[in-house]
Amino acid sequence: MTADNSKYINYETLSSGDLISKRSYVIDEKIVNDYLSATQDQNSKQITEDIPSMIIAALGLRGVVNDLKIPGGTLHVGQEINFKSSVSIGETLKCEAHLLSNTVRKDWRFMSVGIEVHNKNNSLVMEGKSSIMLPA
Amino acid sequence: MNEGDILKPIEKTIAQDNINRYAEVSGDFNPIHIDEEFGKQSQFGKNIAHGMMVAATISEIMLINFGELWQSSGKMKLRFKSPVYPNDTIRASGFIKKITKSEKTNDIHCVIDISSNENVVISCDAFVSTPINQETI
């Protein structure tokens, strides 16, 4: 499966290895300031000139949320994140997400999604795994 | 730093406005976060904050305690246990559980919880490696 323009996705058809999302973003000052304001983070800017690493994670998840067309009522139950490199304002990040597993138990569908974020030099800056539960 | 050392805690009150701003940053406009009526009809009875927005405080704690090493080599494993609601006050606190010394690094395992109303809402195992003789910022 790849991202498409349809409103709904038949999650039963998704298999391990499917490409869920492929997006790129340019990190600008606005997104950093918006993130710091949203999270009430008053420390990061005083410690590092690089962007707070959780912005990378948020952008990595953005494609998953939107291209997987996650419905209301979905629960994010677990998240693993490995930061590999700092990122500066002005850098371009390329985010890819692949389905790792897709199972149904009782009334819930359990999906895990692997996320990789690379910079423009194709160096890995973050990898992660999201675990979500969707109403089946 | 030593095993058992307490990490500097952080406390914040989450407003609906913070949640709305995080929706813009993350692109996650799930109505469970931002639509008051949807929240009322949900199993939670009200809107809930994005888990990753709440978890950002854990990364903030690690950055405060370990500096830029956290940004370039930190690892975290998060378990979202309970929702955080608008106007909840969260407290992130943790300690160093284990330090494993190798030839060139100290591999530090921290345990950090975020609590709200005395319930743990997120638990986290966080890992960072510091070069020998450069344990903290």
Image (cartoon, rainbow, N blue to C red):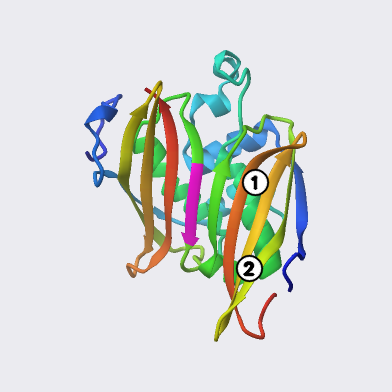
Predominant SS along the magenta part: strand
Q: Is residue B52 left or right of residue A105?
A: right
**Tag 2 residue:** A48
Dot 1 and dot 2 within a common chain: yes
Q: Residue at x 41, y 28 (%)?
A: A134
Q: Position of residue B112 (x, y in %)?
A: 67, 53
Task: Identify the chain of the residue marked 1, using the numbered disc in the image.
Answer: A
Whether residue A47 is visible, yes or no, is no
Q: Within the magenta stretch, is there residue A80?
A: yes
**Tag 1 residue:** A39
Cβ–Cβ below 8 Å for labels 1 and 2?
no
Assign a secondary structure to mark 1.
Answer: helix
Q: Residue at x 37, y 37 (%)?
A: A111
Task: State which quarter of the image contains the C terminus of chain B.
Answer: bottom right
- Image quadrant in which you'd find residue A19: top left
Whether residue B73 is visible, yes or no, is yes
- Image quadrant in which you'd find residue B69: bottom right
Assign a secondary structure to mark 2.
Answer: loop
Residues rendered magenta in the picture? A78-82
- Image quadrant in which you'd find residue B17: top right
Q: Is residue A36 left or right of residue A54?
A: right
Q: Within the magenta stretch, is there residue B49?
A: no
The three-letter amino acid code for the residue at tag 2 is Thr
